[in-house]
Amino acid sequence: MFSEELLFAAALQIQEPLYVEKVEFLKDEGELHMYVDFRKGARFRCSVCGTEGLSIHDTIEKTWRHLNFFQYKAFIHYRTPRTECSEHGVHLVDVPWGGSNSGFTLLFEAFILQLAKCMPISQIAKLVDEHDTKLWRIVGKYVNAALKVADYSDMERVGLDETSSKKGHNYVTIFVDMDETKVVYVTEGKDASTIAKFKEELPLHNCKPQQITDISCDMSPAFKKGLANNFSWSNITFDKFHVIKLMNEALDKVRREEQKNDPELKYTRYIWLYNAEKLSISKTRKLASLRNSNKKTAKAYQLKLNLQDIYKSANNKVDAMIMLEKWYSWAVRCRLEPVKAFAKTMRNNWSGILNYFDSNMTNATLEGMNSIVQAARARARGYRNVNNFITIIYLLAGKLNINFQFYKQFYQNYGQPKLPLPT
């Protein structure tokens, strides 16, 4: 006769000397409780060194939350044995469904990690009826473990950028392996010390700071200072999109000043800032009309287009240097103060701007990751603390190797579950 205990033992892939002693369904509480025990005289292996055939020193009652049984919470209770190893002393034995110090089974933890990639933790907490603090511990445990063994020994090209952790002036700085397109380090703040922290972290991941040959970033004075102090040997590339952004800001300053005496320029901000191919037909006509007029804004706009053309047409660093010298000479004599100030900023960052034409590095990868991170932040309506935000960044963009080796090995021996696991 096939009892319910045998049924659940088969479902949990439990084998001798373990067995399901009894199963209780608490209808009022909406909970299923499975009690696991071991046969009299059973012997176990040391959880530290793997020595087989150790006798039981004592037992401790422990409980794990498992995946739901239909819509009901499910719990595994086990009179967990402790063995005494001659070399390592007394330790709890490993259990097939979860770590000895965890309040959840490995299947449950894998389920939470899968959901955390696409749902806020607060929503997952409501879904599984657990406090979100416990779920953050699960996610943090695996993310931190994966980070400790992450290997960056082949990393040579790095990009860095800041992103806001919440409203106001609260930021974290993200460092990305530009070749592998993955986040390798995140730290609170956006000052020069963030780069020093990154340098200190590299040896922990088999990466020598001296092997970082190229770094891409914006022209932030804090980043420039940090890189000069910590990566003086690296080629610094200033992101071309940041350069064009600064030019757009100068263009808009010219427009705002001119529109005070020229009402025709009101409500035309985005006509000048957007690329022409992205404008509607009506706005394209409006732009053509304004460009043909003798306006200061039109002159600044033409300077912007010429700068964009240099990035598109220069074949190498020498070509770019010749073209940029001509552009700079025109810009500093244009009598448009915002554009002249921008041109001087370019001159002060000349080598980093020219390095783009050798490295072709941009922060486009970082901007893409930033959009994913900010979308997650928006879904969650912010995070309780910056550490939780950093954990989610690593989970979403770190390409971490989440280690379920024990879990996978067990089910390779005793049957594979239906739930797909993170890799």
Image (cartoon, rainbow, N blue to C red):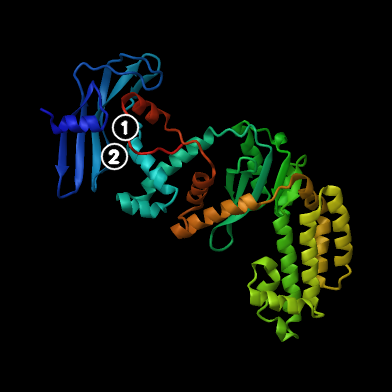
Q: Which mark is residue 162?
A: none
The residues tagged by marks 1 and 2 sit, at their Cα atoms, a distance apart of: 9 Å
Assign the N terminus to one quadrant of the image.
top left
Q: Is residue 411 above or below residue 85?
A: below
Q: Is residue 201 visible?
A: yes
Q: Is residue 412 above or below residue 155?
A: above
Q: Is residue 300 above or below residue 114?
A: below
Question: Could you tell which of marks 1 and 2 lies nearer the N-terminus?
Answer: 2
Q: Considering depth in this image, is 56 or 13 the residue closer to the camera?
A: 13
- Asked if the residue at tag 2 contacts the one at tag 1, i.e. Cβ–Cβ closer than 8 Å, the answer is yes
Q: Is residue 220 visible?
A: no
Secondary element under disc 1, as helix, strand or loop, is loop
What residue is shown at x 74% (from left), y 59% (from top)? 243
Identity of the amino acid at label 2? His
Quadrant housing residue 211: top right
What residue is shown at x 81% (from left), y 51% (from top)? 354
Q: Local crowd at mark 1 within 10 Å, few (<14), some, or many (≥20)?
A: many
Q: Which mark is residue 66?
A: 2
**Residue behind mark 1:** 97
Location of residue 186 in the rendering, given as x and y in whole percent from the top left corner = 58, 46
